[in-house]
Image (cartoon, coloured by chain):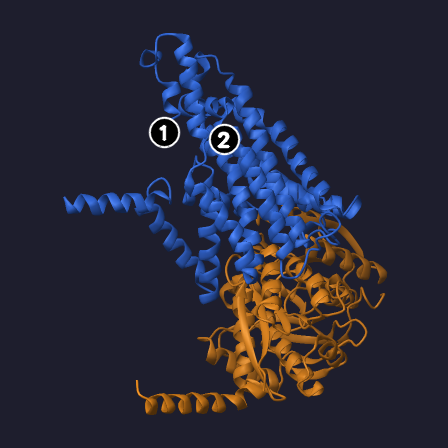
Amino acid sequence: MPTDTLTQPPTAVAPTTQGLHERALRNLGRTGRWRPAEFVFWALAAATFFFLPDQHLLLGEIAILGLFALSLDLILGYAGIVSLGHGVFFGVGAYVAGLISIHMTGEPITGLLLGGVAAAILGLATAPLLLLRASDLTRLMVTLGIAMLFYEAANKAAWLTGGADGLQGIWIDPIFGRFDFDLMGTTSYAYALVVTFLLFLVARRIVTSPFGLSLAAIRDNPMRANTIGIPVGKRLVAIYTISALYAGIAGALLAQTTMFVSLDVLAFHRSADVLLVLVLGGVGYLYGGLIGAIVFKLLQDTLSTLTPQYWMFWLGLILVVIVLIGRERITGAPATLWNRVRGMGK
Amino acid sequence: MNRRNLLCGAALAVSVVMSGWPALAAEPLKVGLILPMTGPFASTGRQIEAAAKLYIAEHGSEVAGREIELIVKDDAGVADATKRLAQELIVKEKVEAIAGFGLTPLALAAAPLATRAKVPEIVMAAATSSITEQSPYVVRTSYTTPQVTSKIAEWAAKEGIKSVVTVVSDYGPGIDAETTFAKTFGATGGQVVESLRVPLANPDFSPFLQKVADAKPDAIFVFVPSGVGAPFMKQYVERGLDTTGVQLLADGGITDDDILNSMGDPALAAITGFHYSAAHDSPENKAFVEAFKAANDGMRPNFMAVGGYDGMHLLYAALEKTGGKSDGESLIEAMKGLAWESPRGPMQIDPETRDIVQNVYMRKVERGADGELWNVEIETFPAVKDPVKAGL
């Protein structure tokens, strides 16, 4: 990984500060440059919109899950914060977006932003809890605990959330007053895809910035990062808040495109699924969440159509196999395979 | 390829197309059956799917010249999945009715779609009263919680029970049951001494049962999701509450026919009110239970199965009435007011509310001659409407 050079001891770097500076800039430029595969990825995503009109509903769900997984990648892949309760931000975003459409305005962009902001505030408020004892195990427990608290709170606050029956009466106005949310899911998919793409661009900018590199330094060795002057605590709180914002927006997207919110958005399986999706796609390169979401949802959809009763068994089996034989990233599989084939030829 | 071969091929192709015509003339009618087939509510899905398939096997897949094609989808009990699947079925598969819906939020999530696409939504399981009010296209063949609970309260008052402690799971349907019971029982002059709510996620009842023991009421009324019934009954008997003269009253979900046998003797303590018992004494039910067991490895049908069975009957009967016409308006109009003899007893779709009107039975658990446990009906409240919508 190119970012490693920054955390290497200074002996490996040119002696003058001038050289160091230039080298850092060059490094930044290199990690920030768009690779051809990335263009292909997004071109294909855009193509699905035009060529797969039948699948818009499923594709919309994939985009939302992808964005949600991307938000987890920001903290897990880039800052090394493990979480079993990321669903809480997703759920809060969904509920806030739903409530805004009922009590304030059906205008989608407002609801989307406020849903994200609400989740970000929660992220900001709970991030310090993760810093108190910075071991993975405590973080897992704390995030899980917070998620359970919110689930139960939403169940109890039936006057606000509708409790177990779900939030009734959400209606979302057409986007920009023009694009109505249709039954085919076309508007929903376009909406979800555009939002996901824009947020991806921002995330990409963030992780290739000096801020993002400092996060990588913290992830690799918090103690050393601290000694070279990176404000570890502040950086972690910042990325955690940004990640919560992303998850909240993903939740708001779900609420708006399905026009329904139930307690389920806060359920534990959301947090578990998103972790699975991310690990499946690979952590730490932003596309992992998106690719994981595509693979996961397509598998789920195909298998559950083939065998509505036993699809979970097959899905589980396939996931275990993928994780066992795969490398860190699902995209690395062809390369690994290629290397092996070449190795055999020699 | 020479010309003769080509001609032969063309003739063959034409004949294939021609022979395909009669099948096309009777355009198939697709029904989307959306159920929780996996996850904690998988048993609901299993029962309903089995019952719907049994109905089709018994009555043939053709009705009023239309071939019925069932498309089963698994939503795992997750509301947004239900919504997407319903939407996909309507848009892509062009289904003309959606059915199933294992839980209240799942039925509610699909209701706006039913309205928008003008597609009938047949609710076969969910039991919250308000569901049928969410769309003019919703009909129900399961039951409503207040329908059953209000009759349990009436029965309790009639049996001379004066004080009751209610114990419900802390979620929508549980709270519905609690309020209905308190209202009906209060109206008869009885007194609800204490209302206890047990967390849904933590089925340890001992502290709550201790409170019941301290309060010494004549009876307790319990509403818990059907899977939680077994541990509750066990703890109830372990604490000896059944011998201290506290009568256990419950919604029939607690002695669900699907799991009743595995609950063993503790189940004998319960008196429950419900709309269906596999032990219901009628030729229709005997035939249903037998056929269901035969087709499903001896699995006993429960109230979910009968909801699925009657849901299919409702669709068949409505299609017969419309002569195969299957637009949403005609189907819903045809469904209103339909009445028939179901395995559960006589039932009707209320023409005003599209909700179910049916008998509510008081039952007690007994060991039958076959050594199995059964819910034996001891009293019948005929033709009960949903009290919430009837304005009672």
Residue at 79% x, 56% y: name it.
B182
What residue is shown with label 1?
Answer: A1
Residue at 51% x, 50% y: name it.
A45
Q: Nearer the viewer, residue B365 or A245?
A: A245
Labels 1 and 2: the sequence-earlier one: 1
Label count reads 2
Left or right placement of residue A339 versus residue A78 in this view: left
Residue at 42% x, 41% y: name it.
A36
| Numbered tag placed on residue A139 in the rendering | 2
Q: Where is residue B156? Give x, y as percent.
A: 75, 65
Dot 2 amino acid type = Arg
For the N terminus of chain B, give its image quadrant.
bottom left
Q: Where is residue B342? Give x, y as percent.
A: 65, 81
Q: Where is residue A112? Give x, y as percent.
A: 68, 42
* Chain to which the residue tagged by mark 1 belongs: A
**For the residue carrying disc 1, how many other residues have a C-alpha within 10 Å: few (<14), some (14-19), or many (20+)?**
few
Display colour for chain A: blue
